[in-house]
Image (spheres, coloured by chain):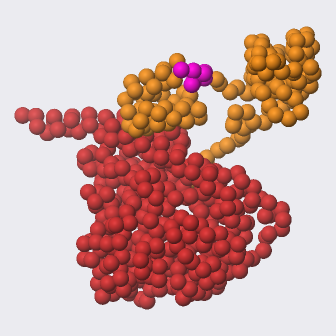
Chain colours: A orange, B red
Amino acid sequence: MTVEELQIKILKALEQNHRITAKTLATMFGVTEEEILQTISAMEEAKVILGYVTLIDWEKTGHNNHVTAIIDVQVTPQRDVGFDTIAERISRFPEVKGVYLVSGGYDLSITVEGTTLKQVAFFVSEKLATLENVKSTVTHFVLKKYKQDGIIFNDGKKDHRLVVSP
Amino acid sequence: MSRPFVKKSLAELPPSGIRKFFDLASAMDGVISLGVGEPDFDTPWHIREAGVYSLEKGFTNYTTNCGLEELRREICLYLGQKFGLDYDYSSEILVTVGASEAIDLALRAVLETGEEVIIPEPSFVAYKPCTIMAGGSCRTVPTREEDHFKLSPAALEEAITPRSKVLLLSYPNNPTGAVMTKAELLQLARLVQQHDLLVIADEIYSELTYAEPHVSFAALPGMKERTVLINGFSKAFAMTGWRIGYAAAPAELIAAMTKIHQYTIMCAPIMGQMAAIEALKNGAAQMEMMREQYNGRRSLIVNGLRQIGLPCFEPGGAFYVFPSIKATGLSSQQFCEMLLKEEKVAVVPGDAFGHCGEGHIRCSYASSVEQISTALERMDRFMQRLARRSRKKTATVFKP
């Protein structure tokens, strides 16, 4: 197995579950735990692995003060840098959780999170819409989450199989 | 007291060796099971969706005995692309209620009373009872771990008698995970030809091979006309509960099997057949994803078992490993019962798959990585405890 092959195998496993232990990965791929840890650190340093996030259903907690909005933004691209400068600028706001350049009727699709509707609305009208080069915004508040990052909320999935079968 | 209503031959037929263990395991809570002989994936959504849609469209009727024409055409296309086989959809394919039905039909269609079926063991639990119920007699051939549980030409030749009619081959194998290469199968084919045998090739795990692609026995020179090829959707497409399998064989054999099928089953359920069409048309990507997952788990469990002192050869197919537990000094049944009671891990005793499976256990890796890891930890603890116990015993025995 080449280094590249090992890297891809590790990435695929981590993408599904980043809490999988180095020991399990080592057993799976027939290498030492040390090799797994080194390969992961190298990929972290190279920013191939950017971070590890946890998907939480906040609705199920007492702290249900999460408001998410998806915002379509039209911007004026700038000479030489196109959309990059404005997109990077928008990315700096901590309220902004995702920024994508998209094809279609508008240019950037951004995801914003806040604690209240008002806070998100304020961010859009005061911070986002007022940026130079931002031509228009259309805000869609998320009413209910069904699936995110490949995971279905309230899936209710169970193993229905018999305990032992031929 | 009334006379016994159940016929003697059936009353004498032993129940599946798995049954007892199933009862034991299902009565317990918190069991991690590596004893399951089916995929842990749900049927891919697009296939389920096709089944639902067929119901919505009102496909709730019988189909022709041999199955929907479109499905049979897709099966022929698939067998052609995958294994280089050339079957005629109109006369050489029969869609059955799972591959299990096809095994039963094939045996019932060909066996005269007392004719022998050669069954390499360890193997799937249904072959022997089906042979007996069809009036045949079983000639089991033990395969050995040293040979990676492949059937050797020498062993086959030795088993052949003038009464031998059928060789039942099942590779990739349940419970061992053994596979056979083309070169090895060719050697068997020569003997099959020489002794004028019919081969029933149960290739239900053909999609789940990890080193080399599966070679279908029917694709070997001269073998198509003497092979009943059996396959299905359960393992490849995670469709066990849909109960859709099929047989591909020369027209004469398919016609005979269809006779039994039409008088007993009529046809396989239509919604399952509709879903199976979708599986063959658009299921390749999801199947590939599942195979990749199994492959990762396979390394995890093989390496894991070896590390805790349960040697096992590396299985090339299916989703089972068949480690040896001989070093523990326990029988397969004892080992499995103790492991279940002490650590709540369910595995299947190897002797359930034939006498030569004694000294082994079957572990299925159709389980999540997390579950396999936890099961391995528990088994490790169990093995260490066994070792401590036996050390203590030895110490007492040899005390001066």
Question: Who is closer to the viewer here, B237 or B385?
Answer: B237
| Residue at x 53% of width, y 20% of height | A46
| Residue at x 27% of width, y 50% of height | B326
Q: Is residue B111 left or right of residue B250?
A: left
Question: Who is closer to the viewer here, B67 or B104?
Answer: B67
Residue B23 seen:
no
Q: Position of residue B111 (x, y in %)?
A: 44, 86
Q: In this rendering, is residue B390 above or below A142?
A: below
Q: In this rendering, is residue B25 above or below B380?
A: below
Q: Which range is magenta?
A: A46-52
Residue A42 seen:
yes
Q: Main secondary structure of the magenta part?
A: loop
Q: Is residue B30 left or right of residue B163?
A: right
**Labels in figure, total:** 0
| Residue at x 33% of width, y 63% of height | B150
Q: Position of residue B318 (x, y in %)?
A: 46, 56
Q: Is residue B396 magenta?
A: no
Kindly indicate the quadrant of the structure image that contains residue B316: bottom left
Q: Is residue B390 left or right of residue B334?
A: left
Q: Residue pushed farthest left?
A: B400
Q: In this rendering, is residue B364 above or below B139?
A: above
Q: Position of residue B94 (x, y in %)?
A: 60, 77
Q: Is residue A10 left or right of residue B177?
A: right
Kindly indicate the quadrant of the structure image that contains residue B178: bottom left
Question: Who is closer to the viewer here, A98 or B334?
Answer: A98
Q: Position of residue A151 (x, y in %)?
A: 69, 36
Q: Quadrant of the C terminus of chain B?
A: top left
Q: In this rendering, is residue B59 above or below B251?
A: above
| Residue at x 46% of width, y 68% of height | B216
